[in-house]
Amino acid sequence: KNQVEQSPQSLIILEGKNCTLQCNYTVSPFSNLRWYKQDTGRGPVSLTIMTFSENTKSNGRYTATLDADTKQSSLHITASQLSDSASYICVVSAETNAGKSTFGDGTTLTVKP
Amino acid sequence: DAGITQSPRHKVTETGTPVTLRCHQTENHRYMYWYRQDPGHGLRLIHYSYGVKDTDKGEVSDGYSVSRSKTEDFLLTLESATSSQTSVYFCAIRGTEHLGGYTFGSGTRLTVV
């Protein structure tokens, strides 16, 4: 069964600090992995997409990494801001998913002043 | 979000009444999805559609039905609402292009009293 596990479940950091969120998956055959950001009361929005051949991809202060061998991804947030407070969701798609992907439960990040 | 709208945004209904939520897209995307999101849970797939009149069940489909008579509209119906269906419902769309991601609506907050 395809699964996506995210850790930690929640995280509190001070403004300006860095943090790293983890995503482990067992989706096969792997196609791509996306990180989404969901602000309170809004729908998720895509931050980055990683394919099998990509190790690292950046989007501003967000940097995603992928290790396809160990089936792990991380999302690193640099110099956090109050606006980074949100839920971060890892979504993994298989090559033969007939339009469906596997969602993680998300990590809730709170950035405090 | 651009290209996808959900209605209503908020609804309060009584137990046992039927409820229909609407998702409308202007992107002409093939795939449409309904998710529910509850505290302590991630996004859980209720039903999805891979074309007009083509739908399939997700992991939490009991008590819900869907219809897609046009490419742009995907309706979610609670035949007889129960308190356990109090939730935030998100619609999402996705195209058929390789590596295409999800675009989510802004959500419908449904309260069953």
Image (tube, coloured by chain):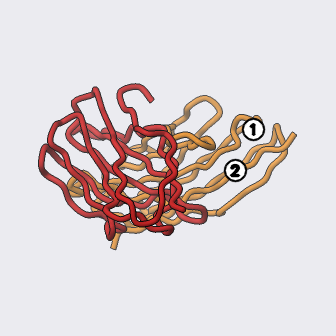
Chain colours: A orange, B red
Picture layout, residue A44 above or below residue B63: above
Instruction: Give the class, few, some or many, for how many residues have Cα within 10 Å of label 2's Cα (few <14, many ≥20).
Output: many
Residue drawn at the location 83% of the way across and 39% of the way down = A15
Where is residue A43? Give x, y as percent: 50, 41
Where is residue A13? Give x, y as percent: 80, 49
Q: Secondary structure under badge 1? A: loop
Q: Which mark is residue A109?
A: 2
Residue drawn at the location 25% of the way across and 63% of the way down = B57
* Residue reaching furthest to the bottom: A1
Q: What chain does mark 2 sit on?
A: A
Where is residue B75? Give x, y as percent: 28, 46
Q: Is residue A24 left or right of residue A10?
A: left
Residue drawn at the location 41% of the way across and 49% of the way down = A33
Query: Can residue A29 be seen in the rendering of this structure?
Result: yes
Q: Amino acid at mark 1?
A: Ser
Q: Is residue B49 left or right of residue B81?
A: left
- Counting residues from the start of the chain, the first of labels 1 and 2 encountered is 1
Along the line of sight, the residue nearer the viewer: A97 or B105: B105
- Residue located beneath label 1 in the image: A80
Q: Is residue B38 left or right of residue A26?
A: right
Picture layout, residue B33 above or below residue B71: below
Residue drawn at the location 40% of the way across and 37% of the way down = B6
Q: CA distance from mark 1 to mark 2?
A: 10 Å
